[in-house]
Image (cartoon, rainbow, N blue to C red):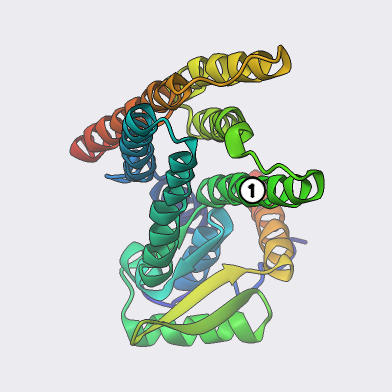
Amino acid sequence: MNDNLFSEKDSLELISQMLRQTKRNLEVGSGNIFLYCGYSALIISIVVFGVVYFTSNSAWASLWFLMFVPNVLMLFKNKKEKPQVVTYMDKAIANIWSVIGAMFILTVIAIFVFGFYLGCCNFVLMLPLSLLYAGIGTAITGLIINVKVLIYTPLLAFLIGIYMLVALVSANEPTVFWHLYFGIAIVFMMIVPGHVINRISKRQCLKN
Amino acid sequence: MLKELNPLIHSQLRLAIMTLLLSVDEADFNYLKEQTNATSGNLSVQLDKLNEAGYIAVEKSFVGKKPRTTCRITQAGRDAMAEYVETLKTYLNGL
């Protein structure tokens, strides 16, 4: 490409060619973030369920805080490997998940502060709220990238989350099985969509 | 009489850069080089010209030990592109 002046028709052709080039499909491995978080959550749910079930000590549920580890690792990885190009779609998705991440952190802080004030700090509310927050994030991501699986699979997580909230309001004690329910919800909300996104992106890449 | 096309944009490489930056939030030097097939030297000169005109913002940083140049279009750049396309339309309507 040289810097010489060119005709108006060439100019129009160049504009449409550049616009075509920036029309990006999903990159291979776009679903990996869902898989890292999804599999971490699934493993933690099984471990927490097993430990709490066999020790009858609900304090082991604090292992759920390990969920912040994969997210912090991803944050460092993203800081080290900046992408060549950031589209408006990438930015919108990143901003949505930043808000969801902030909501997670604020909820933990709020539960801690209110719990301290009320004399009882119980993080059980984090399970249903996490399902609702992450479910909203996944569904909006699905709408933006136009992948229907991501829009509908979080519905199960919503149902499980709402069931947990209703059970809490109805004064039913949360059971140890809630940890497993959470794991099942994560399979549908993050693991299945993660694999679907990776399959779609691989197919798009092979087509190009 | 037809209005003159903005000479700063009406050049093959600069128009390509502006169009690319118009359709993404930000892009680094290597991406622009790949998409435009320009040489590093030429691309660098054209980026400087657009930057001086206030049409794009250039940010130089380091990712690890590697230098990274990120470009994004400014509001002035968007306005200039909108005006350029409008003028271009008048030229094409006259054909």
What count of labels does the image hold?
1
- Is B80 in front, or is A166? A166
Q: Quadrant of the C terminus of chain A?
A: top left
- Picture quadrant of residue A196: top left
Q: Residue at x 28, y 36 (%)?
A: A198
Pointer 1 local density, CA inside 10 Å: few below 14, some 14–19, many at least 20: some
Q: Is residue B7 visible?
A: no
Q: Residue at x 53, y 59 (%)?
A: B19
- Is B24 in front, or is A144? A144
Instruction: Indicate left or right for B40 with B83 as reference.
Output: left
Secondary structure state at the residue bearing disc 1: helix
Q: Is residue A87 above or below residue A139?
A: below
Where does the image place residue B77, in percent across and percent down from the top left? Answer: 67, 68
Q: Is residue A149 above or below residue A49?
A: above
Q: Give the residue pinned by disc 1.
A: A108
Where does the image place residue A120, in percent across and percent down from the top left? Answer: 71, 42
Where does the image place residue B79, in percent across and percent down from the top left? Answer: 74, 62
- Is A95 in front, or is A184? A184
Residue kind at label 1, given as amino acid type: Val
- Picture quadrant of residue A181: top left
Instruction: Name the chain letter of the residue that bears numbered label 1.
Output: A
Q: Residue furthest right?
A: A117
Q: Residue at x 30, y 68 (%)?
A: B37
Q: Is residue A47 visible?
A: yes
Q: Residue at x 65, y 53 (%)?
A: B91
